[in-house]
Image (cartoon, helix red, strand yellow):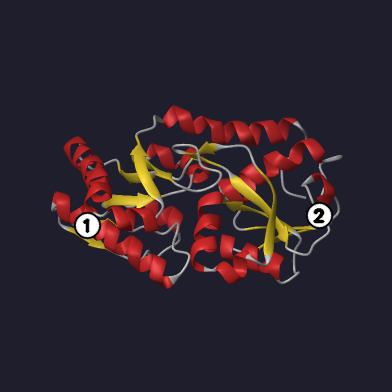
């Protein structure tokens, strides 16, 4: 089988995308499979389900919404970023730098923005944070979907929205490589933590290859420490799927509070 690989999640700029691609190429060269690094030519839910997927990265929300039945977990990256604790991460609640809001509670009636309906960091954790504040299932005056964390940050910075929840790893990269955008927003809180975005493989990948991938992941950190620092990588954890049940708990807790969707 001819395997494919892609890392679609933390490509904040073209330069960072290239850095991740070079890192992935280094991982693959260490296990020497017949594998191509590709750009997904379909929506990610379909791509992640490809039977010849050797390695990619997904969000924990779609993982627990059914994807887990067709893939296996390789490892979860650990990042050096504010809001991360080992393999767990949270979202940063942001508003405009000059906005009047100083907490999520102060955003009642404001304009919220989020990236995707299937995002744990941008939607699910955000919904969970808002749920205790909502009244009759409502909190915000308006809600806009942008399609990406960068889109959400720019909507807040440009005064098209007032508050967003941004994956803390994404936000750390924005501070690194897009400092002018980072200066236009301000953190006013964080969401609850949950397991980070896992590296996955098709269920067809043999166990020996999964083990080789895990070894290669760690080798790339020690062989190129400067690159690991730029990518904010500190290690990898092998989490059981049961750890990702926390993501479903965030959803259940919000629904139990009567807040089923951002609004």
Q: CA distance from mark 1 to mark 2?
A: 44 Å
For image coordinates 57% across by 45% down, the residue present is: 120
Point 73% across, 63% down: residue? 97
Q: Which residue is mark 1?
A: 26
User: Quick one: label 1 or label 2, which is nearer the N terminus?
Assistant: 1
In this image, 187 relative to 138: left or right?
left
Residue 90 lies in quadrant: top right
Residue 149 position in % (x across, y down): 58, 60
Q: Position of residue 215 (x, y in %)?
A: 21, 41
Q: Residue furthest front?
A: 226
Looking at the image, residue 202 sits to the left or right of residue 249; the answer is left
Mark 2, residue position: 101
- Residue 93 in picture, x, y percent from top left: 67, 50
Left or right: 223, with 192 as reference point: left
222 lies above or below 36: above
Eyeballing the image, is 223 above or below 155?
above
């Amino acid at each position: 089988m001819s395997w494919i690989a892609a890392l679609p999640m933390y490509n904040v700029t073209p330069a960072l995308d290239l850095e991740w691609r070079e890192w992935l190429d280094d991982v693959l060269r260490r296990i020497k499979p017949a594998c191509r690094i590709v750009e997904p030519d379909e929506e990610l839910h379909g791509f992640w389900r490809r039977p010849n997927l050797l390695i990619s990265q997904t969000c924990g929300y779609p993982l627990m919404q059914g994807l887990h039945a067709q893939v296996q977990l390789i490892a979860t990256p650990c990042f050096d970023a504010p809001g991360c604790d080992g393999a767990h991460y949270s979202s940063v609640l942001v508003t405009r730098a000059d906005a009047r809001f100083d907490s999520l509670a102060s955003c009642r009636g404001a304009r919220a923005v989020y990236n995707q309906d299937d995002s744990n960091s941008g939607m699910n954790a955000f919904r969970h944070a808002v749920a205790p504040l909502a009244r009759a299932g409502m909190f915000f005056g308006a809600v806009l979907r942008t399609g990406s964390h960068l889109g959400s940050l720019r909507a807040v910075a440009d005064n098209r929205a007032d508050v967003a929840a941004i994956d803390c790893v994404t936000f750390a990269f924005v501070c690194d490589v897009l400092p002018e955008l980072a200066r236009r927003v301000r953190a006013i809180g964080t969401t609850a933590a949950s397991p980070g975005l896992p590296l996955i493989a098709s269920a067809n990948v043999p166990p020996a290859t999964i083990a080789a991938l895990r070894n290669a992941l760690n080798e790339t950190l020690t062989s190129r420490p400067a690159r690991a620092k730029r990518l904010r990588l500190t290690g990898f954890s092998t989490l059981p799927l049961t750890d990702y049940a926390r993501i479903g708990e965030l959803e259940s807790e919000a629904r139990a509070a009567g807040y089923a969707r951002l609004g």
